[in-house]
Image (tube, rainbow, N blue to C red):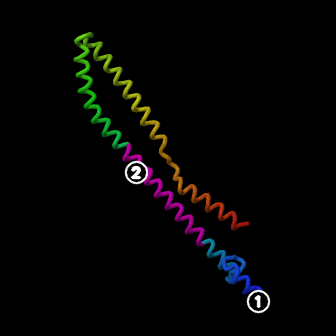
Amino acid sequence: MNSDREALRRYPDDPANDPRPAKEIVTDLWSHTQTLVEQELQLARCELELTTHRAKRDLIAASASGAVGLIGAIGVAESIILLLSKRLEPWASALLVGFAFLGAAYGLFAYGKRDLKRIELPPEKTTTSLQRTAHMIQEVRR
């Protein structure tokens, strides 16, 4: 009996020193596991909402800038066409300026597409937390 008290005093966190019946320990473990899984799902939901919100915000800003930029580009294109019309035929000036703007549009599209690919859709914190939880459960089962 003294050795039990001594072990409890020296190693209070050791599961072998828990005085509760096994059924109660298993019930508590199940309850804590259930709570942990619910919290993991809530974390995943929050991370996905945040990622979605950021992506939506960035896409709206890009769309708005595209509309405003289009208005400015039309003015610049007209000016360039009028300027080039002094040296070239008007149709050739318009064609040249049109191709220049198409090239710029392609470059901007490629840049935006590359940046959109950088957005991490899988919730990184949740994935890490779930991996830790799974590892912890495996350790407890051993």
Cα–Cα gap, marks 1 and 2: 61 Å
Residue at figure coordinates x 52%, y 60% from the top left: 41
Q: Which residue is mark 1?
A: 2
Residue farthest to the bottom, as pictured = 1
| Image marks 1 and 2: residues in contact by CB distance under 8 Å | no
Residue 20 picture quarter: bottom right
Instruction: Check the image and report above or below for 38 versus 111.
Output: below
User: Can you tell which of label 1 and label 2 is closer to the viewer?
Assistant: 1
Give whichever of 65, 31 is nearer the camera: 65
User: Residue 118, how many percent across, how many down?
Assistant: 48, 42
18 sits left or right of 119 in the view: right
- Residue 98, percent across and down? 32, 21
Does 80 sit left or right of 117 as displayed? Answer: left
Q: Residue 127: say if magenta.
A: no
Query: Quick one: quadrant of the N terminus?
Result: bottom right
Badge 2 element: helix
Residue in the image at 40% along x and 49% along y: 54
Across and down, in percent, residue 62 comes to 35, 40
19 to the left or right of 126: right
**Residue carrying label 2:** 53
Query: Would you call the spot at circle 1 few (<14 residues within 10 Å), some (14-19), or many (20 or more)?
Result: few
Q: Which residues are magenta?
A: 31-58
Residue sitting at x 31%, y 20%: 97
